[in-house]
Amino acid sequence: MKKNYYQPEDLKKFGSISEWNEDLGAKFFDYYNSVFEKGSLTKREKSLIALAVSHVVQCPYCIDAYTKDCLQRGIVKEDMMEAVHVGAAIKAGAALVHGVQMMNRHDQLSM
Amino acid sequence: MKTKSLKAQNNSLSKTEKQLEILANGIFKDGSLPTFKKKIASNNLPPIRPKKLEILQLNVGYMCNQVCAHCHVDAGPDRKEIMTYKTMEQILKVIKNTKIRTIDLTGGAPEMHPEFRWFVEELRKTDVEEIIVRSNLTILLANKKYNDLPAFFAKHKVHVISSLPFYKREKTDRQRGNGVFESSIKALQMLNKVGYGVLESDLQLDLVYNPSGAFLPGNQAALETDFKKALFEDFGVKFNQLFTITNLPISRFLDYLIASENYEEYMHTLVDAFNPSALENVMCTNTLSVSWEGFLFDCDFNQMLNLKVDIPSRHISEFNQDELKNRFIILSQHCYGCTAGAGSSCQGSIA
Ligand code: SF4
Ligand code: SF4
């Protein structure tokens, strides 16, 4: 076994997850590819969303893949960072909005 | 940004044998990736063979006013290789005796050749339909003596194809040198002014985009839309088409790939993106490349690897169409650059 949880070269082997369950694997990749086709949103917009979400879910494979995808689409680094901030802001907001729950609970328990 | 060619730096990669050795060994030797020939065979595809010869691409010399980081020619101000008058005359003779449609002048900066204008005028007297000049744009402003080139191009209906890596300053300057973006924009405005790239005119101005790093070019049509919008809105610049070109792993780009530890990943990217339908239209099927010394090559890339055509008559002075038509094209792993994704040629994507 390798000593690290993540290996960069494992990204290339992503497709192999189908080997242990062909049916579900195929369904997933089919769905995944359809999602990234141009729809009402452009492929460029989808790539930036994917980049932001990659950071929020903190997936190193997705970050590698979508940074490269953005570069290929001619997206400049300033736009990429803006997208990451959108993701980060939502994540921070999601943490902070729970502060209301904390406040409610605090008030409920306090005299 | 380096300011010298690999040759002037005495970099071992300036030797073509060294480049070919790298492309033949490592991941291609240990079987991690298939060689280009194996890849073709395993896809049950026919070998690449020459079709009708339509384009003669002439490299008139490696001298250039720029030293771009990705340059596959290893061109620069320190390169003195230049085509002789005699070779130019031999080329004109060949053109008069064949039905070549397009002459594609490249370098270095072809405009720096002392006989450049004479040569274009002589080419115009022949039956060739199209004369392309691959201009790096900044040359038009590099010296007073080049300032009237747009008018010269227009007079001889030269088709101008120019590199502009991006529509923003930073990426362009990182790849091509400081200040290149600004001069390029000025040069484009000069070309627009004499009628290039504008709707009402038949003077053709195309731009070439190649990625500024170890990744593939995106969709040609999408990038063309982005370029057109940005260049027009920001600078009032117009052009006809955008060609996306993949960087091939040779010369200075190979040096960059190795130094930045991107070589293996880049080769994987090229091989994974292998597109069988691009194979049919790779450049070597309808183009022949001539070096400053008058030698013949399957393409400009093979020229830079010093892989001369695989026939007995290898020089323009002994141009033999039958031999050329029946030749086998010399392939190596750099060819993956022509077949990745939408494919790549000097006229952009091909699949
Ligand atoms: S302008 Fe063209 S020939 Fe000159 S260094 Fe740049 S890529 Fe090479
Ligand atoms: S690199 Fe040259 S020889 Fe190889 S496929 Fe491309 S055009 Fe043909």
Image (spheres, grey):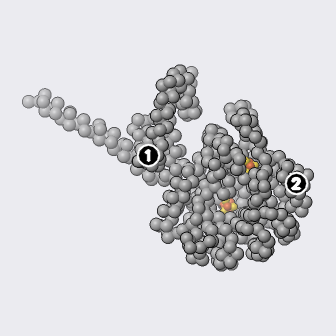
Residue at 79 percent across and 50 percent down: it is: B50
Q: Quadrant of residue B32?
A: top right
Amino acid type, mark 2: Asp
Q: Secondary structure at mark 2?
A: helix
Chain containing the residue with disc 2: B
Coordinates of residue A32 in the picture (x, y in percent): 47, 35
Image quadrant where one finds the C terminus of chain A: top left
Marks 2 and 1 sit apart, C-alpha to C-alpha, by: 51 Å
Do we see residue B6 in this rendering?
Answer: no
Q: Are marks 2 and 1 in contact (CB under 8 Å)?
A: no
Q: Is residue B133 above or below residue A50?
A: below
Res. B78 image quadrant: bottom right
- Note whether ligand 2 is within 8 Å of mark 2: no
**Looking at the image, residue B179 lies above or below residue B37:** below
* Image position, residue B142 (x, y; %): 65, 72
Residue A87 visible somewhere in the drawing = yes
Residue plotted at (55% across, 30% down): A15
Using the image as rendered, state which of residue B204 and residue B235 is in the foreground: B204
Q: Which residue is mark 1?
A: A39
Q: Residue at x 77, y 42 (%)?
A: B47
Q: Quadrant of the N terminus of chain A?
A: top right
Instruction: Give residue B322's mark.
Output: 2
Q: Note whether B139 is above or below B39 in the view shown.
A: below
Q: Residue furthest left?
A: A111
Which kind of residue does numbered mark 1 sit on? Gly
